[in-house]
Amino acid sequence: MTTQTDLEKAFRKAKKAWKVDKENKKLKKEMRAAKKAWEESKSGDAADEKEAPKLDVAALEKAFKKAKKAWKENKGDKALKKAKNEAKKAWEAAKASSESEEKTEDKSDSVDIESLKEAVKKARKEFKADKTNKAAKKALREAKKALEEAEAKTNGEVEVEEKETPTDVGSKRKREEEEEETKEEDDGANAWASMSAKKKQRSDPVEGEPNMKCFVGNLSWDIDESQTRAFFKDCGELTDIFWLTDRETERFKGCGFITFDSIEAATKACEKNGQDLMGRPLKINYAKPRPDKDRKRTPKKGGGPKREPSERPAGGTTTVFVGNLSFDIDDDAMRGFAKGCGEITNIRWLTDRDSGDFKGCGFIDFASVEGVDKFITEKNGSDLMGRTIRIDYAKPRV
């Protein structure tokens, strides 16, 4: 008898075959037929026994990760980008629905906890196989967090006052040993978290002379502009956000600068020094003014002052860095904006390594050095889609 699991495997196999050759109509037809059979099987099973929400969420999460991986291999393909966004949307909707259903389900707690325990074991096994894998490490932490929350919820609702049996004690001791082992494997991550928590409670004094710009450090690698604006929304209007990245690897350094429309707003932001954002206590200080601070800057439409470019490389360059971009920017909008400056040969948008989310910046390659010079001279500090964009010469890699 064909089971739902068999149908799911058949669908994934057909889908994988079609992805290798998307022009093959026969493979596409087989993939759709397998998908339809699997979905009908799920619908039939739901009439007898409700499927656990966690299984749906897990399947959608895998689909999103596959779609994201496919898009990363060819970021210029708009169809892949659209498929990735739709998969992400479906996954997030399923997670929200799952959380809503869990509030009304009383009998599913024990089953969920058991499945979460299995998920923790599986995640730990994958992390042990490759301790340098950050994705596996993150998955293990999330699985442990989900298990702890589920157990806390169950204990709060049931409020059992019975004594622990030898089996319970043994299981608890085993789990504590496993958690202790994981702490050692995390290369001091938990020790750092404890140290950060103490810093948060101490709230070190703010450094620097009051001005409209603040330095923000100890940021999560998953931070983005929208989360930053939401965190500082009660301080005042943010006019500019600048993430610090490595010049050679282009990787985010976990810190940056934020600029407000007034010193009062920046002062309120500095009062948040030590507060938690995305699980990390922030380090916030007034930014140190540059030696050329007295040089006048011309405000541009879209918010934020114009930032002067760095020194032009000897002999020029054909690549520029563009920052403070709208999250709705695309290749066509950028080419239209640069029209008249020269031929653009390539555009590279910077994205988060784990989530695939756009960071609001990127690199543009021109066909000539003259095109770069003209683009920086005429367009730096101009408004593009409501944002004052920053343009600078890209330093050549060593």
Image (cartoon, rainbow, N blue to C red):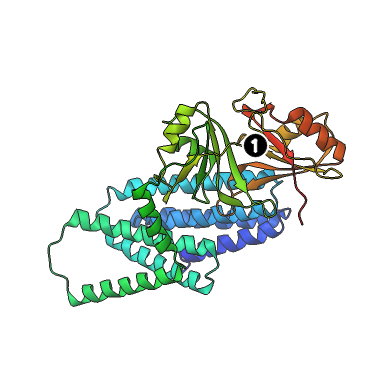
Local SS, label 1: loop
Which quarter of the rendered picture does the C terminus lie within? bottom right
Q: Is residue 26 left or right of residue 197?
A: right
Q: Is residue 378 left or right of residue 3?
A: right
Using the image as rendered, state which of residue 240 and residue 30 is in the foreground.
240
Q: Badge 1 is on which residue? A: 291
Location of residue 278 in the rendering, given as x and y in whole percent from the top left corner = 43, 48
Location of residue 62 in the rendering, given as x and y in whole percent from the top left corner = 52, 57
Please tell me whether residue 340 is drawn above or below residue 4 in the rendered image: above
Number of other residues with Cα within 10 Å of mark 1, as a class: few under 14, some 14 to 19, many 20 or more: few
Q: Residue at image x 12%, y 66%?
A: 162
Using the image as rendered, state which of residue 280 and residue 291 is in the foreground.
291
Please tell me whether residue 3 is drawn above or below residue 52 in the rendered image: below
Q: Is residue 236 visible?
A: no
Q: Residue at image x 50%, y 26%?
A: 262
Q: Residue at image x 44%, y 54%?
A: 56
Q: Is residue 344 visible?
A: yes
Please tell me whether residue 2 is drawn above or below residue 233 in the rendered image: below
Location of residue 18 in the rendering, given as x and y in whole percent from the top left corner = 67, 58
Q: Is residue 113 left or right of residue 321?
A: left
Which three-letter amino acid code belongs to the residue tagged 1?
Pro
Using the image as rendered, state which of residue 394 and residue 71 is in the foreground.
394
Using the image as rendered, state which of residue 87 and residue 332 is in the foreground.
332
Q: Quadrant of residue 166?
A: bottom left
Q: Residue at image x 79%, y 40%?
A: 312
Q: Quadrant of residue 256?
A: top right
Location of residue 300 in the rendering, given as x and y in whole percent from the top left corner = 65, 23
